[in-house]
Structures are given as structure tokens and as C-alpha cells.
Image (tube, coloured by chain):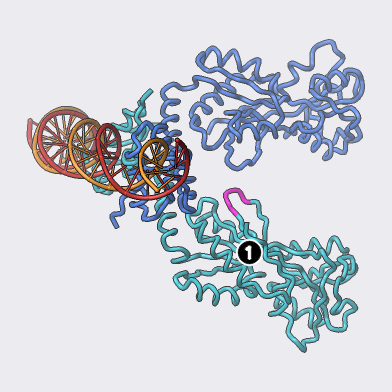
Chain colours: A cyan, B blue, C red, D orange
Amino acid sequence: MATPQPTLTQLRALVGVADHRHFGRAAAALHVSQPTLSSAVAALERTLGVQLVERTTRSVLLTAVGEQIVTRARGVLGAVDDIAEVAVRARAPLTGDIRLGVIPTVAPYLLPRLLPTLRGRWPQARLRLREAQTATLLAELRGGALDLALLALPNDEPGITEIPLYDEDFVLVTPAEHPLAGGSAVPVAGLAGQDVLLLEDGHCFRAQALDVCREAGARERATLRAASLSTIVQMVAGGLGLTLLPAAAVGVEVGEGRGLAVATFRRPAPHRRIGLAYRATSARVTDWGLLAAEVRAALPGTELDLSPVPSV
Amino acid sequence: MATPQPTLTQLRALVGVADHRHFGRAAAALHVSQPTLSSAVAALERTLGVQLVERTTRSVLLTAVGEQIVTRARGVLGAVDDIAEVAVRARAPLTGDIRLGVIPTVAPYLLPRLLPTLRGRWPQARLRLREAQTATLLAELRGGALDLALLALPNDEPGITEIPLYDEDFVLVTPAEHPLAGGSAVPVAGLAGQDVLLLEDGHCFRAQALDVCREAGARERATLRAASLSTIVQMVAGGLGLTLLPAAAVGVEVGEGRGLAVATFRRPAPHRRIGLAYRATSARVTDWGLLAAEVRAALPGTELDLSPVPSV
DNA sequence: AGTAGCCATAGATCGAGGCTATCAAACTTG
DNA sequence: CAAGTTTGATAGCCTCGATCTATGGCTACT
């Protein structure tokens, strides 16, 4: 036994050589002398008992094992960097850029409340906002273009962790003179035969609302798919049908004196769960927990059917 | 900048303390003196600039950051161990125990050919075989109870890598006096209205064959679901219906003089792809490539409709 | 053949990490 | 309540290994 274990320095040396395919340049990039680098790689080969690099004076190639080990070494070094990053983040919680993606059926209703709160409590945090649909957000999250996404759960994406934030009932928006207008505890089946206006394809809220319609036996007015909830509500005001809104949208979208009425469903009403998603490997888990608390604190009061999900 | 990076020794020290919650015992476990361990942890805290461990003389606790970093440190150390493992495996290819799981609709037809080949060429390899259905194999693979699984692709399991091995056509087995008996280039639609015997639930081959039946408009004789292809073929011989077999099974299951006939489908015939699956993080990727080559070499000749998938 | 480029080896130096011995604090016990 | 025990931190010394400079040897191109 007693095989000495590879050193981080040795791994860095190997990765450097793999990157530059040249000992001299790799040494320069690592700020060490060329002999140091040579001996580091040699030592690694000795401890592992395998040749990793094919050297001729003309070219430097990796062996098959070398390639495999370089891949793993990169992972190790990256993970060590992450450790340092975690420590730095812990020293200065919720500071710096936070690239947050938000779905369009949440952004206009939550952000106006969240941003001031956040600015007040964590002035060092700089939110970089992006509004896009779930599929886009998850792709960008995975690719590292976003740090966080605020969207409907669950998504069951491997490698992505989710923090539930709140549950939001769906409500019915109708013209004021509609039979269902202003009702409370409307059963879902009460939608049977109604013309329902929905968002265009790709919105997760479209899919959820469509599920409700299917269960109730309502028709979608498919020729009128809209790009935003705002547009839909205007169409409802124009008498083209009725629609479903997430509770948080009511305050903004349904004003007084526009000939609109809001009806609530019988409990348990159809609803969706909103939460944060981040890469499971993110170095800023603690930050995201703090941010989650801020979002919960920024929720509108009880006049809406919003229930924050208790944090673990 | 010039922040020194954490050392592997320091990470080992931290993990040791986290495991034992006691400096003295952790030091003993790591074969170093207690002061050495103390100073290693202290040095790590200094380089990271964060307190990781709460020490009183009575108890040792991790801080929140400490917990996070311990988790990552474990990952790093594990990855380093893996690197050593990769090297060892590369020095002695295809040696030692290989825990291989095989689905029941492949095992009896491929293993009798594979085992002798393997024994001849890689006498140091010890196959530990296990026969189970796909879901079980994948769970055991993920949990580390298996190294490899031989099954139908694709499975699209995150964290699991697959090596395609060969494509295998399905054939029709009927009683000798059946109208379809011995046919070649039978269209799938030719199954319309037939009574087809299938495996019981949980077999992937059942699902695949059922797809064919659905497409063709054939009926499953659902009261007669069998536990093995052998049993099914006997039932066909008894005149209870017909069945589909994967091509590799024909040689073993359909003997002469049993009143059975084999018909082939019109190309492209329904078929399945068989391959190997392993944890993407496995340290023995090279071994699995070699083993894949052996399986391809062990395939029966062209009398069956088996086409090896060319290796990358 | 000469030369330039490139990696390996040799020998010297310096610091990180290891050990022993000892201290300080806190809980236990007679 | 005082002495003892347990446990982690500190001090001081030592050793080994990582790094440096200088040099050697090989290959390819001119």
C-alpha cells in the first residue's frame, strides 16, 4: 500500500500541459519554471504508475489514460475553486451580480414588490433580470448564463434544485355581466361549456390553465391565443370570453370600472406552486436561501390567495 | 489576490474532524498527531477567511459554511481517489470483479457465447452475474451494487452512460400450420387480429412487443402472460397463439421438430437496440469499452438478424 | 553539420507540514 | 471546592519535498 496520493499541484501541472500541449508555455501560464512542471508531471506518473503524456521533442500528446485523468483532474480543480468561492460568498452574503430569470406570468406581479425590499435590505446585491419562458430559463440556468430562476414547480430537472416559495390559487376573470361574475367557491365544473381565453404556446401557465379547462369541459378559444395576461384580460373586457389568472396578477390586471369581475374557485382551488431553481452545484446556496426569504417577505398580503410555503 | 488555495491535506483534516467531531480521534484516524490536525484545520480557515468549526473543549460543531464545504471537500477527495483508481485499472485492464446485470430476455442467449470468449481472452476478469429487469438493474447500477448493465437502449437516465452494442430484429414464432408460418418479409400489419402471447409486466421486451401489436392491431392474450420466453414458446407450440421473439432467442428457443415456424418481418423490421450502461463517473470506462468489444465479438453470425453497432 | 527548440536531469535552497512538549480552559469528582 | 482529566491550541524544532538555476541530450529543420 502506502501509495502516495496525487497532489493538487501535480493535477494542475497535468491539466496545464494538457491545455497547452507544451511544457514551456504551460509552465509560464502556471507561473513556475519548466523543470518544476516537468518533475511535477513525472511525479504524478510515478505515483499513479501509468504514463499520462507522450513526449517527443516535437510534440506533447496525452495517452488514453491521460485524457481520462485530465478530465477528472479538471473536475477536482474546479471543485476546489468552488470551495474557495463558497467561502468568499459566505463572508459577504448576497452581494454582487445575481442573474435571475423570471417567467412572464410572475415577473410583472412579483418584481415590483421584490425589488424595493431587496434594495433596502441587501443594497450590495445587483439583480440582473431576464424574462423568459420556463424551457429557456432552465436551459440558461444549466448552461451557467443564469444563477437563479423564478418559475413554477416542480420541474424535476436533474442537477437542478428547487426552493418552494408560495402557492398561488387560480381565479376566474369574467365580464361584469357574466353569469359566473364575482362568484366565490365556484366549482371547477362550473366552467363547462365556457369560452376560455389562454396564453400562446410555451407558457407553463397556459398548460396549467388548459388542464383545468379539460377537467371542467370548457373550450379554449384557440384562434385568440395571446402573448400576455394583460392582452387576455383586455380581450375578456371586450366580451370575447373569460379567462383564468394566477392570484398575484389580479391586482395589476383587473382594475376598477373596466367592466370586469373576479370569481374564486371552491377550495381546494386549482393553483400553482412558484419557487426558485438553481444548479445543485451552485456555490451560493446560502445566498439563495436568503433571497428566498426576501421573496416570501415581498408577497402581497392575504387579500389574495397566496400562501407562502414554510421554509424547511 | 495571491490567496493560497486549500490543500488536499487540509480538506482531509476538515473531513476527518467532521466525521469524528473530535480532534484527537480524527487525528488518530488520519495517522497524524493532534496538533498537526489542529493546525491544518486552522490553516484552512485562515486561507478561506471563514470559521468552519466551532470548538469548545466539550464539543466540536461545524458552522453552516463548514457543512457546505465539508460536502464539497468529500466530493473532491472522492474524485482524487477515483483518479488513483482509474490509473490502477489502466495498469491492469479488465481484471477483478465485474458486477454485470443482464435483462432476462438477453441473458440466456448471449451469455453462453460471451462467457467462454471472455474467459479465453481476459482470464483475470471475474464476472459476477445478476439477472433482473431493467428498472432493478438501473437502480442497482445507480446505487453502486452493479458496475455494468446489459439491457435495451435507450434509457435516458441522467448520470448513466450507454454503449450501443447491437440491433436485434424481432421475429414471429407461430405453430407450423399457422397461415403466417415461415413467412419472410411479413408486414407488421399482417399481425392484425392475431392472438399474441407476451411476457408479464416489467419486462422491457413486453413493452416493445406490445407497441408492435398495437400498431398492427393485434390482441394480447392477457390471461396468459408468461414469466419467460421459454414458457411463451411452449405455449405457442401448444397452439395458444403466436409470439414475437428477439432474433437472438430463436436459436435456443425454437428447436426442430416441435411444430414451430419462424417468420421474419419486412424490413425495416421492428427491433431493439441492446447495449451496456454504466455510471458516467465510473473509473473503468476503458474496461467497459474493451468488454463491449468482446460482446460484439461474441454475437452469433449472420444467420440471425443481428447487426453490431460500429464502435465510435 | 550546425542550430534552434524543447524536455529531462542535477544540485542547491527554502518553506510547508510534521512531531514532541507544554499550556489553557472546562467539565468531573472525591 | 480543589485536584484531576479531558481536549484543543501554541511553541519550537526538524525533515522532506517543491521549487529554482544551470546544464545536458535529443530531434527536426536549414
The x, y position of residue B252, in whole percent, is 74, 16
Q: Residue at position x 73%, y 74% from top? A: A304
When the figure is inspected, residue B32 is found, relative to residue A223, above or below; the finding is above
Q: As drawn, is A190 to the left or to the right of B311?
A: right
Chain letter for mark 1: A
Q: As drawn, is A119 to the left or to the right of A136?
A: left
When the figure is inspected, residue B81 is found, relative to residue B99, above or below; the finding is below
Q: Looking at the rendering, which quadrant does residue B310 occupy?
A: top right
Which residue is most to the bottom? A257
Q: Residue at position x 28%, y 54% from top? A: B2
Question: What is the chief secondary structure element of the magenta stretch?
Answer: loop
User: Can residue A39 be seen here?
Assistant: no
User: Can residue B227 be seen here?
Assistant: yes
Amino acid type assigned to the residue bearing label 1 in the image: Gln
Question: Would residue A276 be counted in the magenta stretch?
Answer: no
* Residue closer to the observer: B74 or B267: B74
Which residue is most to the top? B257
Q: Which residue is mark 1?
A: A133
When the figure is inspected, residue B171 is found, relative to residue B77, above or below; the finding is above
* Residue closer to the observer: A198 or B78: B78
Quarter that holds the N terminus of chain B: bottom left
Q: What SS does tag 1 mark?
A: loop
* Residue closer to the observer: B115 or B248: B115
Q: As drawn, is B55 to the left or to the right of B98?
A: left
Q: Looking at the rendering, which quadrant does residue A201 occupy?
A: bottom right
Number of numbered discs: 1
Instruction: Tell me the crowding category of disc 1: few under 14, some 14 to 19, or many 20 or more residues within 10 angstroms, Cα based.
Output: some
The x, y position of residue A239, in whole percent, is 83, 81
Q: Residue at position x 87%, y 14% from top? A: B259
Range of magenta residues: A157-161
The x, y position of residue B23, in whole percent, is 41, 40
Q: Looking at the rendering, which quadrant does residue A24 occupy?
A: top left
